[in-house]
Image (cartoon, helix red, strand yellow):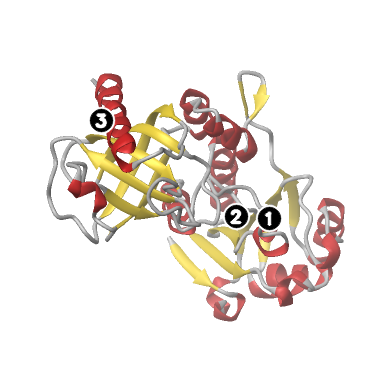
Amino acid sequence: MQLIRGQHNLRPSHRGCVATIGNFDGVHLGHQAVFAALGEKARQYGVPSTVILFEPQPMEFFRPDQAPARLTRLREKLIHIRACGIDRVLLLEFNQHLASQEAEDFIENVLVEGLGIHYLYVGDDFRFGRERQGNFSLLKEKGEALGFSVASMDTVCHADCRISSTRIRTALEVGDFDVAQACLGRPYQICGRVGHGNRRGRTIGFPTLNINLHRRVSPLTGVFAVRVQGLAEQDLPGVANIGTRPTVDGEGRPLLEVHLFDFDEQVYGCQVGVTFVSRIREERKFPSFDDLKQQILQDAADARRILA
């Protein structure tokens, strides 16, 4: 899959494609259905399939304090999109220039001149351009005038409810990993690189993998039974905490810490995947570090029992 970073990197060879536009946070089954339909259209037209993404996501630009938690950071999103067989991703920086661009200019400059699209899939509630003036009707109108077709994405449901990123976030908030998995088509996982921590866990016999979440808000907080991929041929069982560590130092941004059972290797810099199996409890502040240690012992025992 080819990644094109920015409109300025579009070349004449990129003209001619079928495309879709969206956040695609989580790359859930609804998104996967769109990508499958896009791939079929690409074969019909004999052109590449292209996904247009914005980074940051528009809500994160306009109202960062109110933006929803990210299900997938950009790196994870690109991995899942590639797995769906998409040929190209056009990644546009969402900044003041793009936010203030007229909807008609975006259509003509990016979609027509830049990509030469033949066919476009969007949600029927898709809005774009300055003050969100662009919509599905405008795309249909401009498509008829400029020579491309526009279609809306079909709704995909689970248990008679529409699959959406919002529904998955709600399921994760309450620890319903079965619903999250049913909507995603896979278990919920967070990926990242193992970094250095303050090594406090080692002093009490619980060394942890420290993983930066690379997002302002985490879709999960609390303590979980997990399985970790990327360090051995088989999944490794463990217990994880996502939060701001109020008992220790109360960091502002959430951190993912994973203690692996019967594992004590140095793995700094390794890329791992953390798959969440079950929620054990919420994060809370303890009166002392000793109280925290006793709770960690109980959490580990609970996680071992769940994963047995």
Do the residues under discs 1 and 2 have CB atoms within 8 angstroms?
yes
Which numbered disc, 2 or 3, marks the residue closer to the eye? 3
Counting other residues with Cα less than 10 Å from the Cα at mark 3, is it few (<14), some (14-19), or many (20 or more)?
some
Q: Amino acid at mark 2?
A: Tyr
- Residue 108 numbered tag: none
The answer to which of 148 and 156 lies nearer the viewer is 156
Q: Secondary structure at mark 1?
A: strand
Do the residues under discs 2 and 3 have CB atoms within 8 angstroms?
no
Of the residues under marks 3 and 1, which one precedes in the sequence?
A: 1
Q: Which residue is mark 3?
A: 297
Of the residues under marks 1 and 2, which one precedes in the sequence?
A: 2
Which numbered disc, 1 or 2, marks the residue closer to the eye? 1
Q: Secondary structure at mark 3?
A: helix
Q: Which residue is mark 2?
A: 45
Q: Looking at the picture, how far across and down is residue 137, in whole percent?
A: 86, 52
In 3D space, how far apart are the residues under numbered discs 3 and 1 (Cα atoms)?
56 Å
In this rendering, the answer to whether 170 lies above or below 115 is above
Q: Looking at the picture, how far across and down is residue 224, in whole percent?
A: 38, 32
Of the residues under marks 2 and 3, which one precedes in the sequence?
A: 2
The answer to which of 204 and 9 lies nearer the viewer is 204
Point 75% across, 52% down: residue: 150
Q: Which residue is mark 1?
A: 119
Point 49% across, 58% down: residue: 74
Which of the 4 image quadrants contains residue 301? Answer: top left
Point 33% across, 46% down: residue: 257
Q: Secondary structure at mark 2?
A: helix
Q: Amino acid at mark 1?
A: Tyr
